Image (tube, helix red, strand yellow):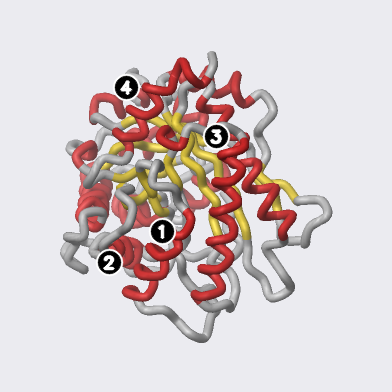
Amino acid sequence: MALSYYAEELKKTAKALAQSGKGILAVDESTKTVGKRLASIGVENTEGNRQAYRGMLFTTKGLGEFISGAILFEETLFQSHADGDSMVKKLNDLGVIPGIKVDTGLRPLSGAHDVETFCSGLDGLVERAADYYTQGARFAKWRAVLQITEDGCPSKLSIRENAWGLARYARSVQESGLVPIIEPEILMDGSHGIEKTAAVQEEVIKEVYMACQINGVLLEGTLLKPSMTVPGAEASNKADPQQVAEMTIRTMERCVPASVPGIVFLSGGLSEEAASVYLNLMNKIERKAKWNVSFSYGRALQHSCLKQWKGSDTDAGQKALIARAQANSEASKGSYVAGSQPSSDEALFVAGYTY
């Protein structure tokens, strides 16, 4: 189908995902990565245990009050709950829109620095996206990763290649009816200051939208998933939460078209509490554009939940998930009171994070 066939549906889905007071639950960890999470609580990485964990998440009563969409790994999109219903049905019953991670991982970028990558998965993407749509997915995600280093990364080659990949992905999945979440992540690795992060992020996001324009991407049917504008994890000059909020909003205002309905930030290794506090402060700042500024968190929504679940305690796991979902819902409206919900302030940063 041509993009024009899905245009109105794409706009409607994007608007539903970007509705005020709601954000996105990222549960798209690969089998290997979810295995590491399960191992941290002493649970074996089997399909049954992955099914049990994700089934616990997707039957959390009231989740749809705070969560508009959930990004799934392919296994989960086609998986059934232990009671026989599909995982897609469980999400739909909660009023949560199912989404799907469609990239096939990072690969070394030839001709660039050793740490630089491109994101693979464009081959056959239109057809795969059509299958995902048939299965019930209504949006997609693709993660490009860039890193700031003292020897010149990200290079012009890396910025251009990753921007082009994001735009090609966005156009491809829109042609099959899926709203693309465009994710140009700047890793927290490094000792650079917040001003350096802001400068690089501006360059990257501007390049992304230039590529989207060339590829004819329908911006009203997209969401942006950027990292927050923070200093490198090893920086000597730390930024306080207010500075992070102000620099992040300034960066977005300089780069993101007003026609994009929503910006859903990734937590990128921030603690659960910091991810909520930073988002809350952003939503207290008057903005030039009317995007909904919200969240698309993985670890910052699941960390305490996983620890409380422990492999079998559904009630405790769901209680922890709802607490963080509500906290971030309030933060997306600028009304979160720090510490008002149970949370962990444990830093979740992992150097060179992959999944």
Q: Are marks 3 and 2 in contact (CB under 8 Å)?
A: no
Q: For the N terminus, which image quadrant?
A: top right
Q: Nearer the viewer, residue 78 or 69?
A: 69
Q: Which residue is mark 1?
A: 253
Q: Nearer the viewer, residue 277 or 352?
A: 277
Mark 1 residue type? Glu
On the image, the x and y values in percent for residue 147 come to 63, 63
On the image, the x and y values in percent for residue 25 come to 36, 43
Precedes in sequence: disc 1 or disc 2:
1
Q: Which residue is mark 2?
A: 281
Precedes in sequence: disc 4 or disc 1:
4
Precedes in sequence: disc 3 or disc 2:
3
Q: Quadrant of residue 282?
A: bottom left
Q: Nearer the viewer, residue 305 or 188?
A: 188
Give the class, few, some or many, for how many residues have Cα within 10 Å of label 3's Cα (few <14, many ≥20). Answer: many
Q: Is residue 259 above or below residue 87?
A: below
Precedes in sequence: disc 1 or disc 3:
3
Q: Residue drawn at (42%, 25%), measured in percent from left and top?
A: 137
Precedes in sequence: disc 4 or disc 2:
4
Q: Secondary structure at mark 3?
A: helix
> Is 171 positioned to the left or the right of 256 in the image?
right
Q: Quadrant of residue 79?
A: top left
Q: Is residue 15 above or below residue 282?
A: above
Q: Which residue is mark 3?
A: 170
Precedes in sequence: disc 3 or disc 4:
4
Q: Secondary structure at mark 2?
A: helix
Camera-side mark, 1 or 2:
1
Q: Nearer the viewer, residue 70 or 118?
A: 118
Mark 4 residue type? Lys
